[in-house]
């Protein structure tokens, strides 16, 4: 039998159902791997070993019955941005280093109802602000493919944990690329669904109009399985959309002949690493061989997406993070002399430098006299970018391009240069601004480092994206590769 | 110099929804601190607001009642500032696109004239919590029960020219929101309160003077006093060569004065922006029309009907329609007492309102029900008792809760209308007061009242006053 952790979530699911192994065995197997490897990676903030084993025992009893829910007994890790009832929920911040969430996020609740066994909570950039997982209060996460490299961010802990096979899959969130970029940098399949497809309730907000929960998995098929449980309308989130959830699994095997793929011209122009460009082009050729048609597409306003994002996201975060004031929960400074002192020191001590930078930026762009020039203008450009995408999708089924300009970079290489760091999200931000679903799938290796292919689709086209990704994964083995130290 | 007063009001009416505007917590007043604050009200990480449909319906009803435009698309914004009773660090309110825009309201002035006051806008927002400073040594407590309670902020044009007009306007809004059943109007509990923007300018000048905003006025009496104090302060300041600074002021009811809270320069930059957690509120015709269909007869319509159907004056009709319950009471009385609408009006506005005020009762808790009052008034109308005796009977009814007839019977208060009996008393009174009789007959006409008094005294007030007058005149004349 193949090693348990070499199997995909779908394969493990089949194994559980066939009773080839129990959920307790599986769960203990992953817990042992976490125990053994996580000191190298720092992918976890919290490991919930005891409750995981208990949940696995219950899952095994459930599996004896005929109506066990779809994901019964499957171990899973949640990004530490999702509130988990009774479990430390830090968002990677000192501010919440003492915060035991009193409720489950909708995503957590739905996956629990589907039967998953939660192994723990994954490290992340503080409040999801970062592209390298270096802003976490809990320290940087290492990339399993090269421990000197970053795993990407902000869902870096989730990505590293899945890539090192410390869990079959993990949840993540993507505000400007925080699922896709780490997926690309660690050789995983990352899906950021349409804005409104998955409930944001219980997901600690960074930029409310951009945040979306999604998955980090080994394969598109695994993502389809998780999405079937996660997606759907939630009355507790006013921005969740009441659109029926299609059968993601049954759509996976549709043929790709006739598929019209738009090549994002702007993505190949400058700043893209040569090897990555080559691998992405090879992936596109494979699609051509599968019967797809490549059409070059231009999104003229897309180059404005980084500046637009860095106005809109900080603006929203400056307001969203006001609730962390030391009054009701989270970090509170010692012996405040008065109210102002309480605010200043609690926030000053509780937030790290990147979070402060964004709060300052956001406060500035919303302030009287600057609102029109920055926030309002950014919203207008956002509309233009969304219009560009809509025009493109009148001609093509999906858009493709690189996920990240380079493979994983060295830890510490960009920490002192926020602008260069921000440019890392140049290819991913557009989909967030337009609310579109997008994926990253592994399409080869630059040396030892994985490279991601990005696939973007029209609103609510997750089934199509998963189908397109699955079609590629049937022909390739990139997603099967395991980092050397973690085999 | 002659100064003209300019006043605009921002009224906060707490909407009478069962649950909060963005959460499912109850809004009832008086619960233990924080017993009605759930995770959404507490601003916990990850929670999200969901708009209460009923609050929207109530705002629309108000808009329709003041003839305003209802926005098909309105937007909730965040007003950002830090305060411990504001859990999220921002208040969700409507800023650029309120749900109600441009209405009017007519007020009746003391001289009987009418004036139209413009309503700029009315928007939905959430209330903040409360800081408790008393019970904690060196610390403050926070009660978030009120946090998230729906408010309708009703902003007037600067159309009022005196404190009295401002009070009349506020009373009219108070009446209206209770008619619409969108606010309980309880000012003590803070369900209905206002901020007043006050300025003065020389008569004839078009440009407004610099205004001050007086915060949190929660009684009609305070509003009038606070505005008048503020006007005098501003005029004195200007006439003394000073300048009014634009600032927020607080009224101190104990001292009867306003004092500066913060200046314009110290004001927060609220950094308003559309709340990304809430979609724009889109209203369709069906929603608006169903709100329209649910509107009751409004106070102005009711008052006009009273004038037309019952022959009441504008003033009386205005008083009787000041609350829906008072109107209902009055109409129940009138239904049993046709032809006596004016008498009924006088009694409801006079004796009944006086008794209710004295006992601090709402008209719905009146100790005398409309049928009982009608029963009493019927005895005046058919001359069984005089108006004066009726007041005594009323008092007894108030205390004992019995019907008028039972009290008239048991106390023997039935009016004496028998001419013979009255003449007999008059004769006795004349015989007992020979000096007064002589004086009267020698021209001291004023003593007529003395004889009326004596006759009434002897009859215990029961003699029919008209008959007494007439018979006395004859007899005294000799």
Image (cartoon, coloured by chain):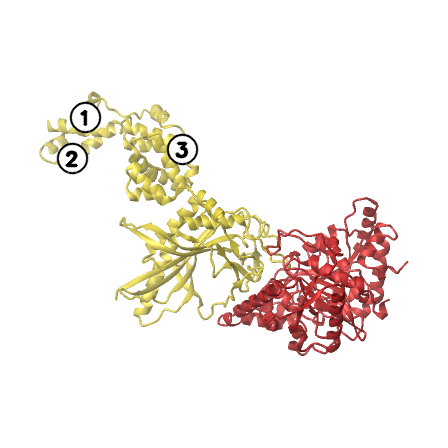
Chain colours: A red, B yellow
Question: Which label sits in the foreground, 3 or 2?
Answer: 3
Where's residue A387, x and y in %?
57, 65
Residue position marked by numbered label 2 in the rendering? B447
Residue most extreme to the right: A1
**Residues packed near mark 2 inside 10 Å, few (<14), some (14 to 19) or many (20 plus):** some
Q: Residues within 10 Å of mark 3 (few under 14, many from 20)?
A: some
Q: Dot 3: what SS?
A: loop
User: To which chain does the residue with label 1 belong?
Assistant: B
Residue ID at (56%, 67%) = A384
Up the image or down, B326 lies above or below A183; here it is above
Nearest the camera: A81 or B278?
B278
* CB atoms of marks 3 and 2 within 8 Å: no
Q: Which residue is mark 1?
A: B426
Choose between B388 and B91: the one closer to the eye: B91
Q: Chain of mark 3?
A: B
Of the two numbered discs 3 and 1 in the rendering, the one whose residue sits closer to the viewer: 3
Q: Is residue A390 left or right of residue A37?
A: left
Q: CA distance from mark 2 to mark 1?
A: 14 Å
**Relative image position of residue A346 (x, y in whole percent):** 63, 67
* Horizontal arrangement in the rendering, residue A114 relative to residue B197 (left or right): right
Instruction: Give coordinates of residue B43: x percent, y percent.
Output: 60, 58
The residue that mark 3 highlights is B369
Q: Nearer the viewer, residue A279 or A155?
A: A279
**Tag 3–tag 1 contact (CB < 8 Å):** no
**Quick check: do tags 3 and 1 share a chain?**
yes
Q: Quadrant of residue A315?
A: bottom right
């Amino acid at each position: 039998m193949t090693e348990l952790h070499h199997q995909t979530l779908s394969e493990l699911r089949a194994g559980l159902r066939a009773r080839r192994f129990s959920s307790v065995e599986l769960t203990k197997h992953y817990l042992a791997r976490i125990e053994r490897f996580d000191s190298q990676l720092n992918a976890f903030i919290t490991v919930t070993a005891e409750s995981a084993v208990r949940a696995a025992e219950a899952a095994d009893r459930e599996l004896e019955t005929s109506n066990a829910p779809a994901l019964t007994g499957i171990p899973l890790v949640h990004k530490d941005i999702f509130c988990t009832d009774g479990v430390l929920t830090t968002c990677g911040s000192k501010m919440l280093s003492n915060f035991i969430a009193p409720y489950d996020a909708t995503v957590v609740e739905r996956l629990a109802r589907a039967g998953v066994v939660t192994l723990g909570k994954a490290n992340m950039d503080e409040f999801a602000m970062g592209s390298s997982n270096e802003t976490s209060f809990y320290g940087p996460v290492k990339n399993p493919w090269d421990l000197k490299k970053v795993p990407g961010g902000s869902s870096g802990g989730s990505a590293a944990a899945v890539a090192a096979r410390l869990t079959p899959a993990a949840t993540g969130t993507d505000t400007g690329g925080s699922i896709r970029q780490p997926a690309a940098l660690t050789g995983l399949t990352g899906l950021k669904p349409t804005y409104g497809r998955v409930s944001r309730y219980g997901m600690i907000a960074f930029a409310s109009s951009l945040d979306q929960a999604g998955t980090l998995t080994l394969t598109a098929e695994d993502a389809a399985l998780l999405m079937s449980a996660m997606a759907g309308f939630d009355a507790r989130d006013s921005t969740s959309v009441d659109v029926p959830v299609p059968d993601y699994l049954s759509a996976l095997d549709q043929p790709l002949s006739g598929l019209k793929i738009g090549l994002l011209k702007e993505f190949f122009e400058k700043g893209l690493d040569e090897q990555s460009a080559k691998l992405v082009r090879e992936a596109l050729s494979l699609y051509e061989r599968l019967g797809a048609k490549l059409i070059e597409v231009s999104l003229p306003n897309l180059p404005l997406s980084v500046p637009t994002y860095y106005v809109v996201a900080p603006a929203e975060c400056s307001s969203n993070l006001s609730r962390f004031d030391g009054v009701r929960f989270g970090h509170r400074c010692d012996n405040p002399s008065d109210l102002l002192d309480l605010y200043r020191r609690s926030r000053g001590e509780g937030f790290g430098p990147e979070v402060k930078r964004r709060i300052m930026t956001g406060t500035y762009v919303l302030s009287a006299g600057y609102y029109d020039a920055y926030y309002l203008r950014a919203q207008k450009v956002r509309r233009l970018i969304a219009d560009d995408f809509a025009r493109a999708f009148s001609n093509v089924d999906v858009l493709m391009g690189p996920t990240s300009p380079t493979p994983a970079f060295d830890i510490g290489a960009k920490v002192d240069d926020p602008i260069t760091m921000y440019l890392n999200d140049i290819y991913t931000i557009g989909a967030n601004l337009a609310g579109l679903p997008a994926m990253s799938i592994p399409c080869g290796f630059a040396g030892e480092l994985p490279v991601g292919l990005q696939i973007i689709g029209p609103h609510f086209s997750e089934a199509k994206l998963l189908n397109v990704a699955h079609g590629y994964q049937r022909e390739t083995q990139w997603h099967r590769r395991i980092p050397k130290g973690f085999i | 110099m002659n100064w003209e007063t300019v006043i605009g009001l921002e009224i906060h009416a707490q909407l009478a929804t069962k649950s909060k505007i963005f959460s499912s917590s109850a809004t009832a007043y008086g619960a233990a601190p924080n017993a009605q604050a759930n995770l959404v009200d507490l601003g916990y990480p990850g929670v999200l607001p969901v708009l209460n449909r009923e609050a929207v319906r109530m705002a629309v009803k108000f808009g329709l009642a003041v003839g305003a435009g209802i926005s098909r698309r309105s937007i909730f914004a965040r007003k950002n500032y830090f305060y411990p009773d504001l859990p999220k660090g921002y208040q969700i309110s409507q800023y650029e696109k309120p749900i109600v825009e441009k209405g009017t309201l007519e007020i009746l002035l003391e001289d009987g004239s009418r004036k139209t006051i413009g309503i700029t806008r009315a928007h939905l927002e959430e209330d903040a919590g409360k800081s408790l400073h008393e019970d904690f040594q060196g610390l403050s407590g926070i009660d978030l029960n009120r946090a998230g309670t729906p408010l309708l902020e009703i902003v007037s044009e600067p159309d009022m020219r005196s404190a009295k007009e401002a009070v009349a306007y506020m009373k009219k809004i108070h009446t209206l929101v209770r008619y619409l059943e969108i606010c309980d109007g309880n000012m003590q509990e803070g369900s209905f309160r206002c901020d007043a923007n006050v300025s003065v300018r020389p008569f004839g000048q078009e440009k407004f003077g610099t205004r001050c905003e007086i915060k949190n006025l929660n009684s009609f009496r305070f509003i009038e006093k606070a505005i008048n104090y503020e006007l005098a302060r501003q005029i004195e300041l200007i006439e003394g060569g000073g300048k009014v600074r634009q600032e927020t002021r607080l009224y101190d009811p104990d001292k009867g004065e306003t004092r500066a809270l913060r200046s314009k320069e110290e004001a927060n930059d609220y950094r308003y922006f559309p709340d990304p957690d809430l979609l724009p509120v889109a209203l369709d015709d069906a929603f608006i029309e169903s709100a329209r269909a649910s509107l009751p007869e409004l106070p102005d319509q009711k008052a006009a009907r009273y004038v037309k159907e019952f022959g009441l004056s504008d003033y009386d009709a205005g008083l009787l329609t000041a609350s829906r319950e008072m109107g209902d009471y009055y109409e129940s009385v009138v239904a049993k007492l046709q032809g006596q609408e004016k008498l009924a009006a006088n009694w409801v506005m006079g004796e009944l309102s006086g008794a209710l005020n004295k006992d601090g009762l709402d008209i719905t808790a009146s100790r005398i029900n409309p049928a009982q009052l009608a029963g009493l008034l019927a005895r005046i109308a058919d001359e069984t008792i005089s108006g004066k005796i009726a007041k005594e009977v009323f008092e007894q009814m108030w205390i004992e809760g019995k019907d008028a007839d039972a009290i008239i019977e048991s106390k023997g208060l039935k009016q004496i209308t028998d001419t013979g009996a009255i003449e007999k008393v008059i004769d006795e009174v004349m015989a007992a007061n020979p000096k007064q009789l002589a004086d009267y007959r020698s021209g001291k006409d004023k003593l007529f009242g003395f004889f009326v008094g004596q006759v009434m005294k002897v009859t215990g007030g029961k003699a029919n006053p008209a008959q007494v007058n007439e018979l006395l005149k004859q007899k005294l004349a000799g």
